[in-house]
Amino acid sequence: RRPEAAAPADDSEARKGLKAVKRPKAAPPARTPARTGDDRRRSKLTISSATGDGEGRSRSLASLRRRREKEKRAGQQVVREKISREVVLPEAITIQDLANRMAERAVDVIKLLMKQGQMLKINDVIDADTAELIAEEMGHTVKRVSEADVEDGLFSDAVEADELLQPRPPVVTIMGHVDHGKTSLLDALRRSNVVSGESGGITQHIGAYQVEQGGHKITFIDTPGHAAFTQMRARGAKSTDIVILVVAADDGVMPQTREAISHAKAAGVPIIVAINKIDKPAADPTRVRTELLQDEIVVESMGGDVIEVEVSALKGTNLDKLLEMILLQAEVLELRANPDRTAEGTVIEAQLDKGRGPVATVLVQKGTLKVGDILVAGSEWGRVRAMLDENSEQVKEAGPSKPVEVLGFQGTPEAGDMVAVVENEARAREIVDYRQRQKREKATLRDIGSRGSLEQMMNRLQENGAKETPLLIKGDVQGSVEAIAGALEELGTDEVKARVLHAGVGGITESDVTLAAASNAPIIGFNVRANKQAREAADREGIEIRYYNIIYNLVDDVKAAMSGLLSPERRETFLGNAEIREIFNISKVGKVAGCLVTEGIVERGAEVRLIRDNVVIHEGKLGTLKRFKDEVKDVQSGQECGMNFVNYQDMRPGDVIECYRVEEVARSL
């Protein structure tokens, strides 16, 4: 039997045996993740996958070229040339502004500050010294400027060449006592000028006008009284060339006439005396001339150098002669100015017009003011939109001594502000911003303390080495004023003495405050008071007003101020010591210290110090002093007593109570 024949049977049997064996189930195949876009892209046949060697996408030629250029630049170290600049440094500057002025990165400036131990941000402000160190460290030169340098060159003080100067009309201010005919004289002068084409009502319209006499013009400033004139002097504006002092022939020299003389002398301008109302039956011009001698005004008819003219505003007498005398005085003064330069002047008055906005009456003193010029007046600026003359007619330009109304200011300037033309708006804004900051700082200082107080005035005198104490005195009657002035002038030594700026009769007015502000002098009122306007002006200017009704108190206060000692000297006198032995708590009284007087004497109501371990714990007054149950006046050394303090309870056994008396001793010259 061949083995091949039996093989299938065996094979079938073997399969039967295999089927009987139970095989374990195979594990299910793992789920393949869903194909993403990249997988789908990989499965696609592209040129790069077909021809490449499996390294992925190759870089473009432009990318390779950029990489080679970058590597080439990295291998070459480019050294930039350092540019040294002149950096202008103000008193304070931000880090950002400093970096811009140096053309450096602000980050580099901050790093340099961090190396010096200062952690600052880009907008922080640093002082000029720190900024100078940084700029020099970075290789720049520094130019330090002050904040006040913005006003440099605003007003030109250079002497003009003679060939550029031309004659200009004189500027005249009329001053005098109330009811002496000042306004009537102005009206008469206006009426006398109608022939030359000037219309009436000019003064009320513009506050200044021009009168023509013999081909020459005269500019009159019509201001109420002498207040505006003093305001101009207080601000340093020499806008007035001649003062006409009006004195009534039937009334004589009055207190306000003397005050006007004081203002004119302080400003250093010549005076022409106009003796008015000579048409009245009671007129006595000789009396006026004699009374003027008391104020050192010697007229020509009495051998002096002051021109006097007898006029009558009501009748129109000698008005032409008055104008001739003004022109004669102007010829002596040789008033000349250069019209071919930038304009400078003074604000005579300013107002806020509903239809036209801020309107300022400007008196041009130098140069020629033109429409379109940019003006700075005090803390305001503006562009000249229009100019009106005294006839309300528009003019294109205004020469020296020409008063015009100027429209175009951003705000209303103050009377007496100096006016100057600048080259552009940026310069005008810079100057105005600086002046407004100065005004705010001055207002803050005035809130802290008055600049015109007697104490601070004497401190300034000691610092500056001055020897005079300026004072302004107003009294109720002439006799009191003369007595006060005489008593104050007798005070003092070789080191310091009182100087009476002005002594007048009547209440304290706004012009008195203005005169005091010009010299930083306090005002002394004897049996008089200041009106509302004067009080407001005194608060605004920081001038102290003191009231007295006894002349001795007035003299003593000024004497103490001249000594630099307004407050009396405090002297301590030691009385005694007491040691606390026990503390008792008594209802309705509080703590009471049982003490033994160890030295001197203890008095009720005296000043005491509580000393613990040689350290002063409390200073105050002694409230209660008892010996046994009785209230006593004092306790001698070696005796026991009970004490408590006013508004103080922290007492301990072993503390020492020092008792002393304070005496106030006034010091004088």
Image (cartoon, grey):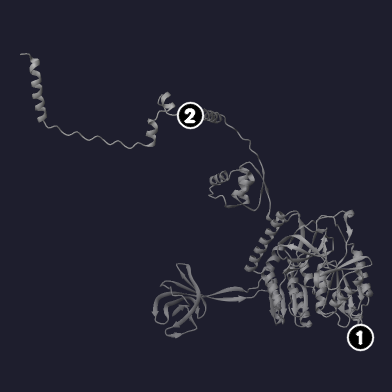
Instruction: Using the image, tell me which numbered label, if any, was put on residue 59.
Output: 2
Residue visible at 46% across and 85% down? Answer: 631
- Asked if residue 661 lies left or right of residue 169, the reply is left
Q: Please tell me in which quadrant of the rendered image residue 276 appears.
A: bottom right
Secondary structure beneath label 2:
loop
Residue type at the position of mark 2: Arg
Residue visible at 63% across and 73% down? Answer: 567
Look at the image and tell me whether residue 109 can be seen: yes
Q: Give the quadrant of the C terminus.
A: bottom right
Instruction: Using the image, tell me which numbered label, if any, was put on residue 626.
Output: none
Residue 296 location, x and y as percent?
86, 74
Residue 173 location, x and y as percent?
84, 70
Q: Residues within 10 Å of mark 1 (few under 14, many from 20)?
A: few
Give the mark toward the camera: 1 or 2. 2
Taking 444 as reference, is 130 above or below it?
above
Secondary structure beneath label 1:
loop
Residue 24 location, x and y as percent?
15, 33
**What residue is pinned by disc 1?**
281
Q: Nearer the viewer, residue 429 or 634?
A: 429
Residue type at the position of mark 1: Pro
